[in-house]
Structures are given as structure tokens and as C-alpha cells.
Amino acid sequence: MSLTLRAYAKVNLTLEVLAKRGDGYHEIATVLQTISLADTLSFELSDVLELRCSVPSLQLADNLVLKAAKLLGKATGCSRGALIQLTKEIPIAAGLGSGATDAAATLAGLNRLWETNLPPQGLLELAADLGSDVSPLLYGGIVLAKGRGEQVACLPPMPELWMVLLRPPINPIPNKTAQLYSKLTPSHFTSGQFAERLVDHLHEGSSISADLLHNVFEQVAFDFFRVLSEYRSVFVEAGAETIHLAGAGPCLFTLVSDEAGGKAVLNNLEAAGQEAYLVRTVDAEPLASVRDRQC
């Protein structure tokens, strides 16, 4: 028995920090949207648990895929093995949820492959132990996440949006997200008003424009990633209008009017030697039953 899943990247359309929690984490409010850039994971029953990745350097014991598999096995008492083959397309450590979406797909895929039949709420509880983006990516589509990211609510799907991503050639930084959080002060905290405004527009069926987007990390990321401003300028020169940070970065993105407009920006970036992607929003998710039963 085997199965294959697509694990979709995400962008944070809004990302706010509301407060510093007593447990050392931060209270957030964020609207996440899955996009068409995706990794592929194939699962096959095996005597042992093994990860094979198209990027060999990611075949490590602390890879979130293996952590998710072991967590599911421990929670369900399942001792079965699996060969997991991961084909990477999503840039790692870029703010696009690369590891989190692979973990979400692993929970979903192995729950089916191993026939452990953990209900959606059980999977979501495991996801919360793996990272703040894993629970929202079990839902897929567009969602509102609060708390540490584990409190997830489905949102009405919006009309398809096209966007261009620019991945600056910045080497992965250990504990990047934690370091960025440490740069925030209470002056950066908000009340969740940006998420609320975007949610209102979605419920009204209104189109989403760049002025509705917000990311608190944009206030500190351009100092943290010292060359990021240079790549924002490259993006502008390529035809991007309003530029946003993806998650904790360093990936940047811009909304475009349509696929043709996106191709023009993409071509300019590639001509300048940049790593760039043209993507669209998608409603697909690794685990439809979570959305079906929780929304």
C-alpha cells in the first residue's frame, strides 16, 4: 500500500503579534493562505521508518517529517514503519511553511497508510506540538489562526489571486523565527485589527488588495536580514508594486493583477539572476477531513 500527497506552501496575508505570553511564546493572529507551490510526499509501508529526500542534507533525525511520524506512532501505539520520499519544491527557511506543510502532510498521510484512524481533533493536537504553522496547514485553503497558531478557524475562500515570490540568496539562519520574535517590543504589538479587517472583507466577498496585508516582522526583518533591502529594490525594478514579507522571511512577495502580469515580473527577476516563482492561491489541503469536520 502506498499513497502520495501534495504539501502546499503558505503566505501570511496578515501576521500580528498581540502580546508576549507567560510561557515565553507570543500570542498571534494571522490569516494564512495556501499557494500552488508544493512539495510532494510519497508514503509506502516498510519495516522501518525512513526518509529519503531530493535534498539529501534534509535527511536528518530532526526533520519535521520524521518528528511528525514518530509523534503519530507514539500517540496511537503504532509500531509500523514507512518509507517516506520527499521531493522538495518549496524553498527552505524562507517563511513559506516548508517544513510545517511537510509535517502536516505526514500526519495526514501516515494516519491513512498506517490505518491509525486518529480523528481530526487528535491530528490537530499533534500538529500543535510540532509548530505554529502545522495546524493551519492541516486545514489548507485560507484560515485564521490565533494563540500560538493552534486555534484555527476556516474562512470563506476568496477569488483566485496571483503573486510572485522572490527568494533572496540568504543562507538559512539558525533559530531565525525565534530571533525575529526577540526583536519585537510591545510597540510592535497590535490588537488583531488587521486580521479582523481582512476577515470582514472575506465574509463580504470583497476582493483582496495589497493595502489589506500586514506583517509585523516587516518592521524588524530589514535590519535583521541586512541585504534584504537590496532585494526589495531588485523586486521593484522588476515591476513589483507593493512588496510584502512572507512569514518570518526572507522570501518577499507581491500581488499581481493576473497570470500575464505575474509572468512579466517573473521574467524580469529571472533575467536579473534571481530565484523567483509565479504562484496562485489554492484551496486544496493535505487532509480534507480536517476541514470537512472542523469547519
Image (cartoon, grey):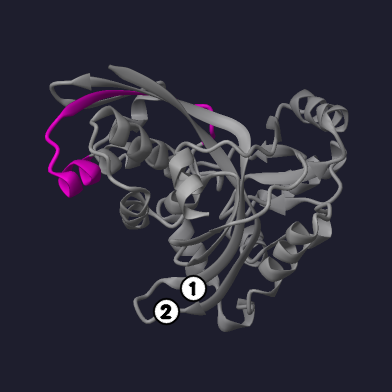
Q: Residue at x 73, y 63 (%)?
A: 198
247 lies above or below 288: below
State left or right for residue 273 relative to residue 143: right
Q: Which residue is mark 2?
A: 21
Residue denoted by label 1 = 27
Instruction: Say what secondary structure mark 1 lies in.
Output: strand
Decide: few, some or many residues near mark 2? Use Cα within 10 Å; few <14, some 14-19, many ≥20: few
**Where 187 falls versus 91 (above or below)?**
below
* Left or right, 56 with reference to 151: left
Which callout, 1 or 2, points at the residue further toward the start of the chain? 2
The percent coordinates of residue 196 (x first, y second) are 69, 70
| Position of residue 82 measured from the top left corner of the image (x, y, whole percent) | 23, 25
Span colored in magenta: 70-91
Q: Are marks 1 and 2 in contact (CB under 8 Å)?
A: yes
Q: Is residue 203 left or right of residue 294?
A: right
Q: Mark 2 belongs to which amino acid?
A: Arg
Identify the element where label 2 is drawn.
Answer: loop
Question: Is 80 a magenta residue?
Answer: yes
Vertical placement of 183 versus 236: above or below? below
